[in-house]
Image (spheres, rainbow, N blue to C red):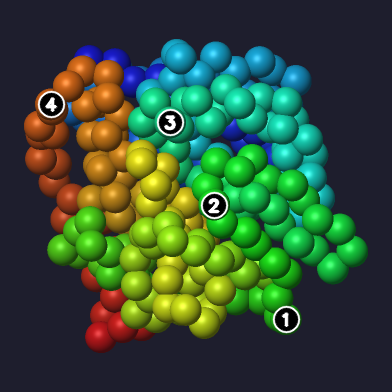
Amino acid sequence: MRLTIGHLYPELLNLYGDRGNIISLTKRAEWRGIEVEVIEYKLPYDIDFSKLDIVFVGGGSDREQLLVCKRLGEIKQQFKEYVNDNGVVTAICGGYQLLGNYYKLKDETIDGLGILDIFTEIGVGRLISNVVIKSDLFDRPIVGFENHGGRTYIGDHTSLGKVIYGGGNNGTDGAEGVVFKNVIGTYLHGPLFPKNPHLCDYVIQKALERRYGEVTLQKLDDSIELLANDYIVNRFAP
């Protein structure tokens, strides 16, 4: 089996170790004998979504988001078609915000892709914290680190999880992230996947099933990864 990962604009969207998520996806697939190709797309590059099994969009500053959003606006329809065809997407922080309808700053509004029916508005201060969430997808909590000034409101969408510790999407409604079809959006940096092998494997499995049908992933020795997860949970949400 083989997976192709499209890493969108890593030269602009790579805050707080987001590139580590690509490493985790690659290694956890390769350890199971799955061949992986990672294609890094810079702003001028064309993207053929039909060749991609996973699309990853990291986090960036407001300035970098503006640059990226202008380019993504040119390929919005292709991106939407990929998502509607159950394409697998993981979007972190700024990348997560870009999937929505808009991000309203103090003096301007960044138009989003409208892939998710969500929106973001600048808040007072920043939400900066380790985060622990309980997701209906897993028995084990998801952990990460947030640092964002935007407040995201997901409406009728399903959240990735309920906040046990931290701010989450907006610091008020107790939700963190979003799950829509095979899209996961979240504010959690860290990077996210090394401390949450269960979530990383979920993304890998969804991509494999879309390409090959029903798949059972070989179990890995996750003792070190789960120690990292347990440490955050026990420290901040005992």
* Whole-number angstrom distance, CA of label 3 to CA of label 1: 35 Å
Label located before the other in sequence (3 or 1) = 3
* Whole-number angstrom distance, CA of label 2 to CA of label 3: 14 Å
**Residue denoted by label 3:** 84
Decide: few, some or many residues near mark 1? Use Cα within 10 Å; few <14, some 14-19, many ≥20.
few
Q: Residue at x 61, y 26 (%)?
A: 77
Q: Residue 82 appears at what percent x and percent y?
A: 47, 26
**Residue denoted by label 2:** 117
Quadrant of residue 217 within the rendered picture: top left
Residue closest to the eye, 17 or 51: 51
Q: Residue 184 appears at what percent x and percent y?
A: 41, 48
| Mark identifier at residue 17 | none
Q: Residue at x 13, y 46 (%)?
A: 221
Q: Residue at x 62, y 59 (%)?
A: 119
Q: Cβ–Cβ below 8 Å for labels 4 and 1?
A: no
Residue closest to the eye, 26 or 3: 3
Decide: few, some or many residues near mark 4? Use Cα within 10 Å; few <14, some 14-19, many ≥20.
few
Label located before the other in sequence (2 or 3) = 3
Residue closest to the eye, 8 or 210: 210
Q: Amino acid at mark 3?
A: Asn
**Residue denoted by label 1:** 124
Label located before the other in sequence (4 or 2) = 2
Q: Amino acid at mark 1?
A: Val
**Residue denoted by label 4:** 214
Q: Cβ–Cβ below 8 Å for labels 3 and 1?
A: no
Left or right, 17 with respect to 238, comes to right
Q: Amino acid at mark 4?
A: Glu
Q: Secondary structure at mark 4?
A: loop
* Whole-number angstrom distance, CA of label 4 to CA of label 2: 30 Å
Left or right, 32 with respect to 49, comes to left
Left or right, 233 with respect to 149, comes to left
